[in-house]
Each structure stands twice: as C-alpha cells, then as structure tokens.
Amino acid sequence: MGRIPDEDIQRVRDATDLVSVVSETVVLNNKGRLLWGLCPLHGEKTPSFKVDPATQLWHCFGCSEGGDVFGFVMRTQNLEFPDAVRMLAERAGIEIHEEGGGLPPGRKERLIAACEAAADHYHTRLTTGRDAGAAEARAYLKGRGFGIETAKRFRLGYAPTTRDELTRALTRAGFTRDELVEANLSLPDGPRLKDRFFGRIMFPISDLNGRVIAFGGRVIGSGEPKYLNSQETPIFHKSSALYGLDRARNEIVVSGSAVVVEGYTDVIALAEAGIGFAVATLGTALTERHVRLLGRFASRVVYLFDGDAAGIRAAKRAAEFIDWHVTPEAGSARVELAVAVIPEGKDPADYVAEKGPEAVRALVKEAQPLLRFVIDQRLAEHDLSTPEGKARALDAAVSALASVKGSILAQEYANYVADRLLTDFAVVQRALAGVRPERGRGGAETADKGSSARGAGSGADGAKGGVTPAGGTDPAAFAVTGDPRQHAAERELLRLAAVSAHARGKARDLLEEGLVLGEENIRLLRMVLDAGAATGGALFEAVARTDREAAEMLSAWLMDTPNVEEVEYAVREIAGRLKDFALAREILAKKAQMRGLDPAKDEAAFDDLFKEIAELQRKQQELRRHPHEADGSGGGHTA
Ligand SMILES: [Zn+2]
C-alpha cells in the first residue's frame, strides 16, 4: 500500500453519491433542499444530522461533526483516510493505482512481514522454550499474574540471550540483511548481524490493523535499560503509535473514552481484568498526534498516571498537552482530555489486581478535566493566605491557560481561578493577557517509564512554570488579543469568507492590514482565500487537499446559500469591529508607553503620546458613530 494519487481520489469522489452512502445506515427525510436524519455518531431522538446533495457535504449540529463522503466513512467505520478511499473505490468498482510512499513498492509489506515472523519466533520461544532463559521469562510473567493464556492472547514473546538466534532464523526464512536492519530487528556487527533484542520479554507493537510493526522489550530481572523499544523505522513512528490500540479501538468507540497508561503490562493487566479501552505510549510523553489519533475513536481521553513520585511528576507536566484541541472552538476536532492519578502510590496493574475493575472504571469516570487538574495543582503549590502567595499562584495558574487563550474555555477557567483566589475576574483577565504559551506544539519526548519526569526541558516544567512574561512589552498591549470578542469577530469573518466569495476581497484586506490576530484563524482564512472563488463542495475539496481537518471544521458553514447583500453588510460590520479592537490595542500600548515616561523629564514625548492617544480615541469614537464608513479612514474600498 502506498500513497493514493489525487486523481484517483477525485475519481472515487465523482463516482460516489453521499446520499446513497449515508442512506445505507441512516434513514434520511427530505426537508427542503437538505435531507435530515438521526446522527449515526451520537445517540439522539430528534434529527440534527443533515446531508446536502448539492455540495455533497454533511453536518450534525448535535455533535458538530461534518465533512464529505470520505469523512463520513472514516467516522462511522473508524477508518483512516486512505482506507476510506479504498473502501469507496471498491464500492464504486474503481481501481486505484497506489504509489509506494517513501519506500519501493512492497518494501513496507516486507518489513511488516519480517516483524510478524519475529513476533512468531519470539512467541514460540516463550511458550515452548526448554532452556533456563525461557523458563525464567515465563516465571517473570507468572509473577505479574500473566499465565500462558495471557501470553497467547497478547502474543508475548521471549528474545533469548544468544546474540543472533533471530537473525539466523529470519535469514533462513528469506529476509535480507537490509530488511532486518531497516525493520530494526538486527544490528550490523562488523560484516555480520546481531539481534537487536536479547534476554528480554517481548511485547509486539501493532498497527491499527493488528500487524506487528515494532517491539518493546523488558529486561528479565535487573539490568539496563529496563525497557527497550524498536527505534523509528519506515513502518514505526513512536509519536503516533500506541501500544494496544488495535485491540482497544472497538471498546474505545463503544465506551467513548480512551485510557492512556504508562506501561505495556498495565494495558495487559487492565484488559485481562475486563477493561479493554487502555493503551500505552511507547517511551514518550503523550503527543498531539497521539491525542488526534485517539480523538478519531473517542471524544474523551483519560491519562491515568501512576501514583508513585515519577507518575506524579509526569502528571504535573500534563499541562503540555493543553492546546487548542481541548477547546469548544476546535469543533469536531475537540478532544476532552482528563487526568486521574492512581491512589496510594500504585500503578494500574497493581490497582486493578487489588481493587478490581470497577474501582478503575470509577477512577476513569471521575477523572478531572486536564485544565482543572493542572490549575488545582498549581494553586496547591502556593500559600493562598498571603498576597504574595496569591500573586504567584495566579501567575502559575494563568500560564496554564496560555495555549488556549482567546477560547471560551480560557474564559471559563479564568472565572474559576478568580473564584478560587477570591479575586476579581478582571485581575485574572489582565494576568492572562500577559502570558505566552509554555511550549511549542508537538509535545516533548521523554525517557522511558521510571525516569519519565526527567528531561522535561528548561522552564517548561509545570511545577515551576509560573508566568512567562511577554518579553518586556507591557502586558496591557496584549489585552485585546486574548479577548474573546476579537476571536468571535475573526471566526465570523472566516465563516463569511467560507460561505461567500463576495466576502473574500474584504477579508483579504483585513488580513493584510494585520487586523486578524489568531494564528489558527489566519491559517484557515488563508486556505479559504487560496481557493479562489470556490464555494460549497468545491471549497471543501480545495481545503481538504492540504488539510482535511480544516475542511471538516469549515464544512458546517458550506451548506449555507447566503444572500449577497447580507454577506456584504455583515463583512462591513465585522471590519468595523476589528478596526475598533485594533484602535483599542494601540491606545493601550501608547498608554503603557506613557506610564514609562517621566512627564517632568520627557515633556515633549509625553505630550506627543498624549496627542496621539487623543487622536486614536477620536478615531474610535468616529468609527463607533459611523461604523459603515470605517473604510474612509482605513483607505480601503467599498463594494
Ligand atoms: Zn451527531
């Protein structure tokens, strides 16, 4: 399998009717231009799921999911995009010609075959080996409560202590030196090869289709490193693979939740106790890609941290997962992230063994929203009885909100922080305005379990994070950037540009004048503007070609057939609002500058600023009196 060419995707799309695909699983009723039915993605009794035959788009305003026919198949059948295309191609009787990704044709299949053969070899060694090493491996697993049946269900294995047994077996089976090295099963040892893993219990790591693509190996008894994973290979990427997801996906879909734990054996212990929706990361922290992957199957992801010191340190760093995906504005891409720490210093395997599966289910159910968890942790680290303690607590709590600044969620939690600190909402608002996100996107890699809290990177450590000052600029200058009204206006502009090509000229002007500030809004607006005059289904396709998630986010709007005059009126109104906000920002910045001056010494500069502020305020008043003449001062044009 490889990359499916765009032409083939287009042919499949052209040959497929969304209405007939949807009708296979949903009863649709005509209501005007659109068809309505009960949403197959969330339980409901009154229809909020609509299909537009004209644009070939669908949307549910109950769960905010939406998109094209590929997206529909992806969501309802839990397929990845290429598999959805393949499925619909088959349905339409279209043959697609796949280009072999980065590897020569068949190469990927060979690497998977090598991993599969290795899994079989290790498994046979574990279950039937008569040597002392195999017996020791079985005894170790038994000690963890895993008998031979468990070993079979999870295809556990044993890599013997001889250094080249697997290499020899796979070479006999016809795999080449390059294949074994590329799959990271063998390592070059001079002219010869040696096994990558020896003297370890082997946990095969599978792709979503259950095919082995990598391994995790645990040392038997003591020894370092305790856990050794396959390195990155053409078929294995740590930051997007999760141990156990292939088995867990069905139960994750059914329960609506995914649980992320720290170790392979935790996943197995939970599954054996009847909790089948747990997965583990592979020696890395949870990344944004993991969250997105899980978000395809669940709307809620619960990170279950070990109760020992390392687990608690890791939990404190959970703030790193906070990004736009947790906000309501993320729409269908939204994932609710929650956190629970296992009590009494235990790990999930111990806990389920002692307390039973219901106790674990209760922990998962009562897990706290990530933001709330992080804020509570930070507040708890300070003495809230003194003003200094409160100030530090405020800075630390608010910095957790930096990466979702401007969202409704940030506002909600700003309220929460104000309540907890018995302070005014405006105080929290001001502190929030001055912080910057604590990290770049993507999530930091960490070492294996056991040392997972180290290597966190400087300054980003949640425990000490505190406020990240906005590089010497007066925080007041940022006050309106984080303003939800600015964000709402930008979203409305984006919506208008998406529904009507008539809004795009003006939207482009506003963008170029620097009046749109939200990074995500700028990105989405650019994509819409790059699509020329395309609207509806054509716009969806144009955007989906570079960013399917963005297209799905827009899809809710693309079924509207707007009235040109209304669009033009609305765009002018938004332009007025954005200009007003920009003036307000300028005024704040100048006031901040003025506060830095000594009127006695810098009289001239002080007077100049004073005049400039007065002039800006005059413009603002003018703008508010005649909102639709906003163009007059901005030098733009009116349609
Ligand atoms: Zn729905």
Image: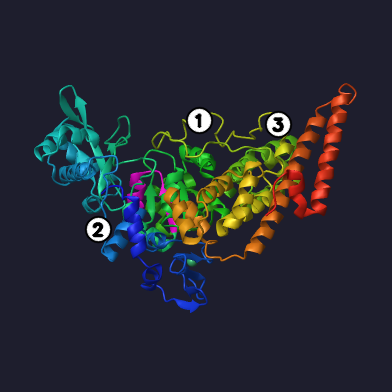
Which label's residue is closer to the chain start, 1 or 2? 2
Location of residue 232 in the rendering, given as x and y in whole percent from the top left corner: 32, 36
Q: Name the residue under label 3.
A: 473
Examine the image and state in which quarter residue 469 appears: top right
Examine the image and state in which quarter residue 355 appears: bottom left
* Kind of element beneath mark 2: loop
* Residue drawn at the location 29% of the way across and 43% of the way down: 101
Query: Is residue 597 among the parts visible in the rendering?
Result: yes
* Residue drawn at the location 41% of the way across and 59% of the way down: 71
Q: Nearer the viewer, mark 1 or mark 2?
A: 2
Q: Mark 1 points at which residue?
A: 457
Q: Which residues lie in the magenta part?
A: 257-273
Viewed as shown, does residue 373 lie left or right of 120? right
Q: Name the residue under label 2.
A: 95
State the separation of the CA atoms marked 3 and 2.
59 Å
Q: Nearer the viewer, residue 195 or 359?
A: 195
- The 10 Å Cα crowd at callout 2, few under 14, some 14 to 19, many 20 or more, is few
Indicate whether residue 335 is drawn in magenta.
no
- The 10 Å Cα crowd at callout 1, few under 14, some 14 to 19, many 20 or more, is few
State the separation of the CA atoms marked 1 and 2.
49 Å
* Kind of element beneath mark 3: loop
Location of residue 546 in the rendering, given as x and y in whole percent from the top left corner: 44, 48
The disc at residue 428 is none
